Image (cartoon, grey):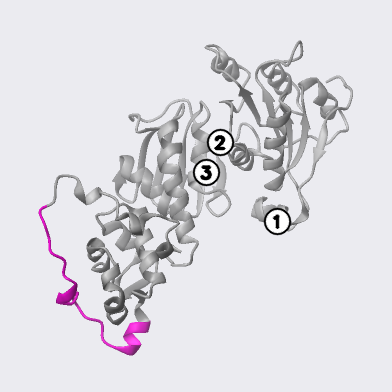
Amino acid sequence: MADSPHRATILEPAPSSVSADVSPRRRSTRFRPRVLLVEPDKDTRSSLALGLVGAGFEVLAAPSIEDVLGELGEGRPLPHLVIAPAAPNGDGLDGFTFCERLRADARTEHLPVYLLSRREEPHHRSRAEAVRADDYLLQPLPPRVVVSLARLKAGRSAFAPAYEAHTVRMPLAQVLHALLCGWRSGRIELRDNEGWLSFHEGHVVDASFEGERGLTAIRRMLFFGSGAYAVSFAEVLAEGKLLLNLKIYASLLLPAAERFAALCALGIPLSARLVVDFKRLADVLKSLPDDVGQVLRLFDGQRTVHTALLECRMPEVTTLEVVTCLYAQGVLVPANLIAEREPVPHTIPPFFEPVLSPEAPGEEDEPFSEAFETPGSSRAA
């Protein structure tokens, strides 16, 4: 590739950001994956570059493809990922031609290439497939989507059969969001749990997790799936139906998954066994909603928090909100603390038994009372 005037800007991460976000296999070295980022719009380029730098990547940013051609010449260190606009900037090269040139050169044919477009043209997907781009994505894109895609493929071959990752570094909810922003078809498969999920052109089409299928499996896989997983891409998928599209996922399920993760980070292990401290319960009973009883009854010292979340009639996130509040108030405590102090009652005392009324269809799925469900409330703090 011919040299061109050097107009690219190199941005490097702060030393402290590298160890936190770069793959654990590379933390012991000073390796920093380099992303070649071409974006004509200055504000967008700055936003994406800062997001990548904050995640530990070194970024070579430029407004046009011509500005980076010299960086790909002989003797120059190659990037580990290329992000370029599908449409040309003025009379310059377009991303499809650029990708085709990269694939035709033995030095650069393996580089992962993402093509970005501000509007989708009918022929763009077929052109992206023809030049073997890794994906074609519509802008505007949140910087964290680009970061997730970079973490998935930077430094790896564009034609690898599968891309390994871990939920500690790349939560499933984030990588699925990024994959649904593209047009590719493929599968996410957990290594340590019984779970997999298939996606196709911005939709989730099938999922299985610990005996569940469909939407329940998607939700529980995002909430409870952990450990190593692999992302693979394929043209042909097993039979499935469109369960979830990008818009619904981004507006409903992604925020729920992130809220669930934030609650877990507060420090109550899902493997913990909790019981009710009835003395403390008597002190705060009047301030609690009546339907909190369905949560309290699940904590008998035998069930784990994980099991209680699965068995409760309320949504998992709502139940975990309640458990977190009750734990913060001292109503739910580790089973061993009560066992050391006094025997654990087998049933809820009669004074706490709520007056039951006939339920209307679907009432069991209604949200918890506003006082308990609002994340910013004083009880949830």
Residue drawn at (82%, 24%), measured in percent from left and top?
Answer: 67
The x and y percentages for residue 113 are: 66, 28
Residue highlighted by disc 2: 161
Callout 2: few (<14), some (14-19), or many (20+) C-alpha neighbours within 10 Å? few
Residue highlighted by disc 3: 174
Q: Picture quarter containing residue 208? A: top left
The x and y percentages for residue 89 are: 73, 16
Callout 3: few (<14), some (14-19), or many (20+) C-alpha neighbours within 10 Å? many
Label annotation for residue 121: none
**Mark earlier in primary sequence (1, 3):** 1
Residue highlighted by disc 1: 19
**Mark earlier in primary sequence (2, 3):** 2
Callout 3, which amino acid? Gln
**Spatial CA span between label 2 and label 3:** 21 Å
Say above or below: 219 vs 323: above
**Residue at the extreme left:** 358
Specify whether 370 is left or right of 35: left
Say above or below: 299 vs 369: below
